[in-house]
């Protein structure tokens, strides 16, 4: 089992920045890629960014490209740096771990609100 805990969410004005963190524990040896997803009220959950197991490859959604950056410093910690935030970035942000056994693990989510 893998446990994921997100932190760093909050309220920020348009144009501001936040850094989300995802801390993994448990059987972290089975973790392959990591990803950040978000779900706005009334909308489906969508991929924001994904990073490969060793951090050598990243994918970022077009809607956040150039503003958000995903990174990881080891098997335990993954980050999402969010800059130039817009009201449409308001959502609950979730961390997901993809295991080598094709099972996904999700965190509980952290709220990000962008409003003036």
Image (cartoon, helix red, strand yellow):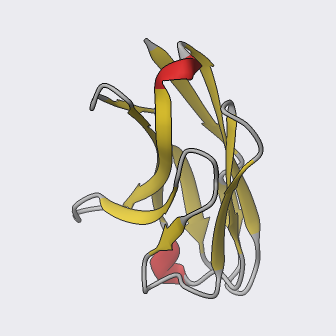
The answer to which quarter of the image holds residue 105 is: top left
Q: Is residue 31 left or right of residue 72?
A: left
The correct choice, above or below, for 6 with respect to 82 in the image is above
Quarter of the image with the N terminus in it = top left
Residue visible at 62% across and 60% down in the picture: 56
Residue visible at 77% across and 44% down in the picture: 73
The correct choice, above or below, for 96 with respect to 47 in the image is above
The correct choice, above or below, for 62 with respect to 5 in the image is below
Viewer-side residue, 96 vs 57: 57
- Residue 17, image x and y in percent? 76, 73
Q: Is residue 84 left or right of residue 99?
A: right
- Residue 33, image x and y in percent? 48, 45
Viewer-side residue, 109 vs 2: 2
- Residue 111, image x and y in percent? 54, 51
- Residue 116, image x and y in percent? 66, 82
Q: Is residue 35 left or right of residue 73?
A: left
Residue visible at 54% across and 85% down in the picture: 65
């Amino acid at each position: 089992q893998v446990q994921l805990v997100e932190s760093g969410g909050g309220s920020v004005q348009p144009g501001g920045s936040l850094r989300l963190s995802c801390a993994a524990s448990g059987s972290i040896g089975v973790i392959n890629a990591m990803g950040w997803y978000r779900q706005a009220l009334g909308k489906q959950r969508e991929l924001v960014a994904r990073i490969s197991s060793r951090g050598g490859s990243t994918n970022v959604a077009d809607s956040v490209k150039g503003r958000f950056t995903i990174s990881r410093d080891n098997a335990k910690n993954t980050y999402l740096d969010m800059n130039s935030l817009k009201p449409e970035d308001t959502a609950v942000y979730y961390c997901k771990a993809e295991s080598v056994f094709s099972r996904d693990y999700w965190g509980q989510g952290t709220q990000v609100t962008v409003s003036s």
